[in-house]
Image (spheres, helix red, strand yellow):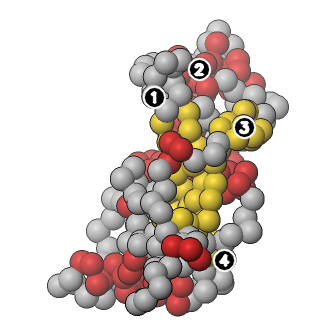
């Protein structure tokens, strides 16, 4: 805690410390970070940003020459962007056909000109469109890359959640800087070993259906597209339990798929 008495100033100070220690590049922000002060600090260190816009975000087109008044200060913002009236085109993104629109715009949240990318989806025929909006200060970044990068951000969120829930990242009582640093590194190492062990138990790797894992573990109402680290840990515990307390694992359908090589690795401890 740099400034414990002021949470807002403390967050900005921590962000400035982080930005000063990493090489210049593209930084992804969640929509909760749509704040001009945050983006100004980012600009001071030469980083580009990629951020999701809130549903009520306001964007403006660049002012045209004829919109400038004859007297007084030149107009900074042009007409307001009305998202449903943007020019949408169909694009192929990872084998899927998506409807996307883009424009170079201005927003009061960011001091620089940004590139706004909007993807619209319709869940059912006849229902209104839903709009997913992201913007970046990197004006040369392709649309497909922008959407792909932000999609990867959610996988990082899942990784953080699983690290907290399964390897004790948030269940600590240390207070010194050195102890916290050690705990963070050990948690990341533990998460990496967990995933490595899970891959080693597969033959071939990445061949385990998610639905099969959920069914055997008795998990209902949760249907992820990929196996999370939490499911990996539960799967490993299940296999080691069978290895220690069951005479055979061949009768279990889950062990047939995951435990094909369960006799090779030794039990922990």
| Mark whose residue sits in front, 1 or 2 | 1
- What residue is shown with label 4? 25
Quarter of the image for residue 226 reads top right
Q: Local crowd at mark 4 within 10 Å, few (<14), some, or many (≥20)?
A: few
In the shown orientation, is residue 83 left or right of residue 173?
A: right
Q: CA distance from mark 4 to mark 1?
A: 37 Å
124 versus 42 height, above or below: above
Residue drawn at x 61%, y 40% is 267
| Mark whose residue sits in front, 4 or 3 | 3
User: Do residues under tags 1 and 3 come within 8 Å of each other at their CB atoms?
Assistant: no
Q: Earlier in the sequence, mark 4 or mark 1?
A: 4
User: Do residues under tags 2 and 3 come within 8 Å of each other at their CB atoms?
Assistant: no
- What residue is shown with label 3? 90
Residue 152 can be seen, yes or no: no
Residue pushed farthest top? Answer: 251
Residue drawn at x 64%, y 54% is 102
- Residue 70 placed where, x, y %? 47, 85
SS of the residue under disc 3: strand
- What residue is shown with label 2? 211
In the shown orientation, is residue 137 left or right of residue 60?
A: right
User: Do residues under tags 4 and 3 come within 8 Å of each other at their CB atoms?
Assistant: no
């Amino acid at each position: 805690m740099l400034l414990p008495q002021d949470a807002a100033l403390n967050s900005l100070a921590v962000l400035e410390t982080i930005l000063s220690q990493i090489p210049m590049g593209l930084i992804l922000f969640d929509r909760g970070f749509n704040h001009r002060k945050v983006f100004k600090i980012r600009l001071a260190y030469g980083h580009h940003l990629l951020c999701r816009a809130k549903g009520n975000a306001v964007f403006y087109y660049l002012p045209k020459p004829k919109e400038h008044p004859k007297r007084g200060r030149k107009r900074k913002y042009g007409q307001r962007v009305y998202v449903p009236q943007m020019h949408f085109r169909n694009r192929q993104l990872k084998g899927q056909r998506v409807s996307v629109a883009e424009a170079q715009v201005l927003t009061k949240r960011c001091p620089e000109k940004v590139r706004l990318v909007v993807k619209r989806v319709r869940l059912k025929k006849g229902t209104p469109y839903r709009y997913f909006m992201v913007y970046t200060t990197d004006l040369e970044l392709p649309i497909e890359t922008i959407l792909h990068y932000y999609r990867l951000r959610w996988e990082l969120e899942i990784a953080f959640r699983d690290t907290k829930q399964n390897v004790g990242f948030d269940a600590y009582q240390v207070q010194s800087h050195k102890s916290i640093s050690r705990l963070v590194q050990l948690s990341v190492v533990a998460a990496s070993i967990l995933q490595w062990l899970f891959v080693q138990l597969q033959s071939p790797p990445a061949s385990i259906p998610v639905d099969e894992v959920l069914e055997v573990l008795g998990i209902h109402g949760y249907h992820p597209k990929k196996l999370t680290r939490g499911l990996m840990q539960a799967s490993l515990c299940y296999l080691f339990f069978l290895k220690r307390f069951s005479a055979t694992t061949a009768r279990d359908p889950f062990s047939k798929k995951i435990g094909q090589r369960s006799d090779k690795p030794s039990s922990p401890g």
